[in-house]
Image (cartoon, helix red, strand yellow):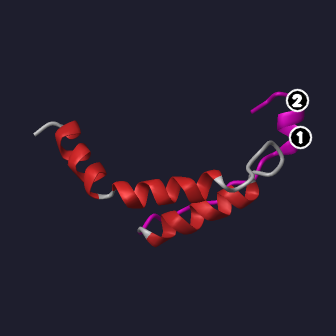
Amino acid sequence: MTDTKKIFPKVDENKDNIIYFLKELIEIDSSTGNEQNAQYFLNQKFKEIGFALKKDFPNYEKIEKNEY
C-alpha cells in the first residue's frame, strides 16, 4: 500500500476534526508581529497528540544583520 493509500482514508475518517482544527487556527490573528497566539495554539494541539516540542526564540541581532 502506498503512503497516499494510507493517508487518504485517515483524512476521510477525520475530516470533521481536521476542518474544526483549521477553522480554529485561521481564526487566530497571526499577522506579522502577532504570531505568538497561533504558536501557542499549535504547541498545545501538538502536545495533545503526543509530540515533544522544543521552543526556539529568534535572535534579533542576526535577523537585523540578515545572518539567519
Q: Residues within 10 Å of mark 1 (few under 14, many from 20)?
A: few
Q: Is residue 1 left or right of residue 35?
A: left
Q: Quadrant of the C terminus?
A: top right
Lateral position of residue 11 relative to residue 6, left or right: right
The CA distance from mark 1 to mark 2 is 6 Å
The front one of 63 and 35 is 35
Q: Is residue 8 left or right of residue 65?
A: left
51 in magenta: yes
**Residue nearest the viewer, comparing 31 with 20:** 20
The boundaries of the magenta stretch are 50-68
Tell me the SS state at disc 1.
helix
Q: Residues within 10 Å of mark 2 (few under 14, many from 20)?
A: few
Q: Which residue is mark 1?
A: 61
**Residue 14 position within the rendered picture, expressed as x and y whole percent measured from the top left:** 32, 58
Q: Amino acid at mark 2?
A: Lys
| Residue that appears at 52% across and 53% down | 22
Residue drawn at x 54%, y 62% is 53
Give how far across and how far down residue 27 sits, in percent.
Answer: 66, 55
Residue 65 is tagged as 2
Instruction: Please name the predominant secondary structure of the magenta segment in the image.
Output: loop
In the image shown, does 29 or 46 lie closer to the viewer?
A: 29
Residue at the (83%, 37%) spot, across then down: 62
Amino acid identity at mark 1: Glu
- Is there a contact, CB below 8 Å, between mark 1 and mark 2? yes
Question: Which residue sits at x=58%, y=59%?
Answer: 24
